[in-house]
Image: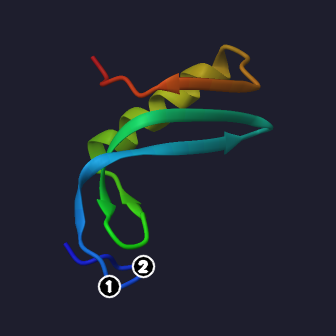
Amino acid sequence: MKCVICKQGNTRAGTATVILERDGSTVVFHKVPADVCDNCGEAYHSSEVTEALLQQAAASIAQGAEVDIRRYAVAA
């Protein structure tokens, strides 16, 4: 698909790093599946990946993490 941010590049399957912050906590996910623009690097995530990221981040924060760095894991 054509990138909606730069309007120049096209996206292709790849991975990205996602940083989520909430209530003073930061959760960093590496190797998150995404369609990535070959021009500007903007990452687009599916609704399934987004939902899994939000659930995993909420669980990490609920356990009291202030900073958590992890590799993305497919939800079971």
Using a 10 Å C-alpha cutoff, classify the residue at mark 1 as few (fewer than 14 neighbours), some (14 to 19) or many (20 or more). Answer: few
Q: Which residue is mark 1?
A: 8
- Choose between 2 and 24: the one closer to the eye: 2
Tell me where residue 3 appears, x and y as whole percent.
31, 76
Residue 18 falls left or right of residue 40? right
Q: Residue 30 bears which disc, if any?
A: none
Residue 7 falls left or right of residue 60? left
Q: Tell me the residue at 34%/85% (across/down).
A: 7
Residue 60 falls left or right of residue 44? right
Identified by mark 1, the residue type is: Gln
Residue 27 falls left or right of residue 8? right
Q: Tell me the residue at 71%/20% (across/down).
A: 65
Quarter of the figure with the N terminus:
bottom left
Q: Secondary structure at mark 1?
A: loop
Tell me where residue 28 appears, x and y as whole percent.
59, 34
Q: Quadrant of residue 51?
A: top left
* Nearer mark to the viewer, of 2 and 1: 1
